[in-house]
Image (tube, coloured by chain):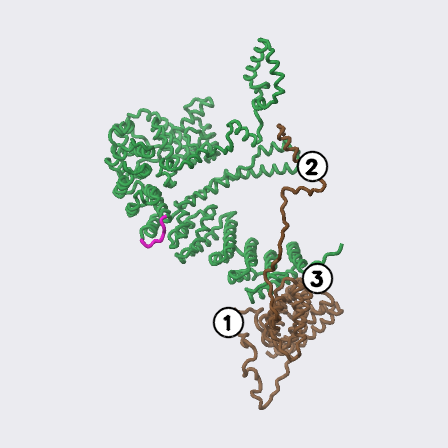
Chain colours: A brown, B green
Amino acid sequence: MGSSVKKKREKKKDFQKTKLKVGKSNTKPDNFTDTSFKAKSIIVNQQSLSADAPSLPKQLHHYLDIASGSRSDTQRRDALSYLINQFTSQPVNATIPIAPLFLVKKLVPLLLDGSDSVRTQLLKLFRLFPPSGLIHDAEHVLLYIRAGLTHLSARISTDSLSALEWLLEVAKDSAVSCPGGWFKTIKCFLLMLGWSTTDKSLGWTRSNSSFGAIGKAQGRQLLVFAQFLKAGICDDHPLVQYDPGNGPPLYREAYMTPTVPNPFAHLNLFGPPRDEETEMYMDIESRQRVFQTHFQPAVEAGIERVKKEAGEAGRSAAVLAKVVRDGMASYSSIGNIL
Amino acid sequence: MVKKRVAALDKVDADLANLQYKIRRDPKSYADDFQSQYQQYSSQRDIFLASPNTASSGSIVSFRDLIDLVAHVADCYPEFTTTFPDDLKSILTLHHATLESELREKIVGSLVLLRRKEIIDSTDLLNILFPILVATPSKTLRTLLYQKILSDLRMSNSKATNHKLNKAVQAQLFNLLMADRASPKGLWAVKITRDLWKRQIWTDAKAVEIMKEASLADNEKVIGGGVRFFLGGDKEREELEDESSDDDGAIDIGKLKHQVGINKKTKKKAKALEKAVEKVKKIEKKKKQPHPLNFSALHLLHDPQGFAEQLFSKHLQSSKSKLNLEQKLLVLQLVSRLVGLHQLTIISLYSYFIKYLTPRQPSVTSFLASLAQATHKLVPPDALEPLIHKIANEFVSEASASEVASAGLNAIREICMRQPMAMNDTLLQDLVMYRKSKDKGTMMAAKGLLSLYREANPDLLKKRDRGKAAIMGIKSGVMKERRFGEEEVGGIEGLELLEQWKEQERKRKRIERGLPEDLATDEEEEEDEGEYWAAWDVESDASSDSGGWINVDSDAEIEISDSEDEKPASKKVKLDAGKEGEKEKPPAEEVKPTVSKLATTKILTPADLAKLQELRLEASVNKAMGNRAQSARLKELAARHIDDELTAEQIEGFARLRKSTKEERIAMAREGKGDRREHRSTQALRREKKDAEGKSTTNREKARKKNFLMTLGKAKGKGKRSLTETRRVLKGHIERSKRGGKRGNIGK
């Protein structure tokens, strides 16, 4: 309560309207801050003014960095397409200034990239490389492919399938025999297909897990799985012919200087001890054994189930069944002999 | 509206949270999804382990989120996630220095989460976190880990004390201290122990043992931490407890009920009231609970003699110790407190003091205080005599400054209070002469010394200084010089007083009931007993106890006697006690006092003991009646607990006031008066304060503020009144003021 005239007047002041006058600007509010500024020139802090363009390797490295490190996906995609352009426009015999191995190592994390176009560009780029360079480095690539296979996003997992197909083309042996390459990858496939090894429910209906694909996509998954198994357990090496007068006849590689880096990796002399999952399975027999003991029942049950569904998936399942049958035929015969 | 395209990132992020929610609701149906996510986690982990330093957080589902998901639902699928805690552990222990900070925090958080879901137990968790806490260079991580470790320890001790875990952690801390005595890492052990001690989670001897080792370490910081704990840890604990008990009283039930009565009644408000009542009840219950026995750290020490000796020889006596003066003073304080409290014997300690006892020594008052603290009645007077002489020579002389003299006298008094035999008569008579000094501090200190020796050993004083009580005491033979090491014979001091008091209480009660005061019937006793059991505890009403005033009645007397068959015995005791009281009245009679049987026949409750202390004080105050200074001193003495330390301020005494500058004195005078910006009357200030509190005005104030025009009419009329009218008005005014206003205060 304003008891005095002064207090009343003060109170009144708050509610008085300010008069607007013609030709005069509005009064500024109390908390007004002047943000305008005047400058004669704007100086950009850093600018390069070199006359000659950077050399090709430098440019390639620059774009490589952008592709692997940029935060914007359009930039990544554009950098990748620049690289593709560079490689395709080179004459056939010209050597690429960057080692493909280095390129693959740097770019392979993009398999898990969120943007579709980046991944397609990446696969396109990978297909350009000569198949020779990559043989020994399947483990690193396979890490990312496996992460892609079980990815939440379905599109990433399909792209990872294509990447695996490419890897099987360029480095088949290395892919199935690198540490963890056989066991873990099959496990990934089973999870992806929903044939998980621990599933023991016998009911009529089963919940389709939210990521499990059906129909066409499943068919593709089955086909790639079949390819992978074929690379692992089907022996398609030609028999070594005896060739007189040409050095030691059989096991010739064993006597020569090894052509691969770290040829005794399977002995695991320096690394941490490996368990069953991360072990290297160098020969067909051991791979067959692992497949039989851990995966075969689940795979066969799965095949039966999918075959009943028919369609494209059913056809692919038949292909897979044939691969399994062929691959395991030789194993069981050996097992019987032993 | 155009449908917004959801970016892949958004979708996937949403999916993980969604998946977690679904799994929580129905773990069985989502087992497949979880497995694939777990697989995803393990492939991400492999990628991470292949190159831990270059792990990118850029990929759309980051490793961090996967860890988060798995940690949250790990309890639903124990069979899949057996290796998960080990994975996290190995990642953290191997790469904690190079990990990206967010990922690191997530891993620590997930481990704690797993602990809360009881997938790993506390011991495992602490075994993982503790080595990293000690080793990591990152400050943020250290803070996080420290906080997590503490909260985990608190949590696992919240319901019941987890002895096993405590023991394991204590052993770990102990080993940390013992492993490398010179390293500053031991500070973590000190910090953790101190914190847990403060919160009363660790109250056992093992924690004290850890601190003991810390104060015997080689690193200055660790030593400082350990010593400070012994000097201040218990106080900290008490303060924390007080704080927490203060918080409880925040709810005012009366006010809440009043508000509910006034405002609109809603279910919500009723519920709020109910909740408040419940809370208050809970707090009451907690207050009523028996107080846990908390021994001070100094009392829990195992082998205090050895500890004090080691401290002294390692940090003070040896020339190798690198402590600075401040730290040395701390250690000295601890040593002297130990010596004083446990009555230890370290003879070389006293000669150590000699070189520090000059007025030029920095913070000499602390040295003096430590010396006084280190004195007790079993210290040989020979060891103290040279020290007292030195203090007297260096500090107390006409030439020295008044503060110095008073500090010296105070120090001598404190020492002699604890060991009166360290003084000889010539020195004492000299020192007592300073009571004629013009300086107030010196005068008071000398008087203190005088009154001390009037009680302790009046023979040393000149005859005219002894005072009436002492002369009479010497004559009657009550006051005798006590020999070195002599202990008083007899049981509990003041027990007969308690007995007397109890008898009086009984009589008073009986008179209240209208019964003859002498005989106690059996039923009555039984009745009483029930009452006493109910009031076992000391009343926790702080206001009645803390004042220290003597004649406060506690609400009920308390006694415990067991069963029927014991009764005759107890009755007899009471009769005895009555007789004893009569006998005490003629003091000249030489009666050998019978030892009271109260303590042997009854259990003394805490309330009894409190009363006993009170009576003891009362008696000593009564003895010193008439002598105001002495009684004041006694009161002060009583207020000081035996465990409390002697501080440098007490030695400085009155001189401290003098040393303050004018500004300080003004500030002191202003303290508590509130600020007045401009010069105004006290009335106006009071009014303002009342306004600020939202209180109403008095009638007088209203009258003063009344509009002048309104009063005019009455004032005009007043002039025209006749004499009788005036008389009537005046009479009415007098009557009203007697009644207390127009309406009066009859209704009250």
Q: Earlier in the sequence, mark 3 or mark 1?
A: 3
Q: Which residue, given by chain and number where applicable, does mark 2 sit on? A: A17
Circle 2 packing at 10 Å, graded few (<14), some (14-19), many (20+), is few
Q: Which residue, given by chain and number where applicable, does mark 1 sit on? A: A270
Is there a contact, CB below 8 Å, between mark 2 and mark 1? no
Closer mark to the observer between disc 2 and disc 1? 2
Q: Which kind of residue does numbered mark 3 sit on?
A: Asn
Q: Is residue B323 magenta?
A: yes
Q: In the structure shown, which secondary structural element does the residue marked by tag 2 occupy?
A: loop
Distance from the alpha carbon under mark 3 to that under mark 2: 70 Å
Q: Which kind of residue does numbered mark 1 sit on?
A: Phe
| Residue B622, quarter of the rendered image | top left
Closer mark to the observer between disc 3 and disc 1? 1
Region of the chain picked out in magenta, as a range: B319-325
Q: Which residue, given by chain and number where applicable, does mark 3 sit on? A: A208
The residue at the point 59 percent across, 9 percent down is B722
Distance from the alpha carbon under mark 3 to that under mark 1: 44 Å
Q: Earlier in the sequence, mark 2 or mark 1?
A: 2
User: In the picture provided, is B303 more to the left or to the right than A330?
Assistant: left
Specify the farthest residue to the left.
B426
Is there a contact, CB below 8 Å, between mark 3 and mark 2? no
Q: Callout 3: residue from which chain?
A: A
Q: Residue A269: x and y, percent?
A: 51, 73
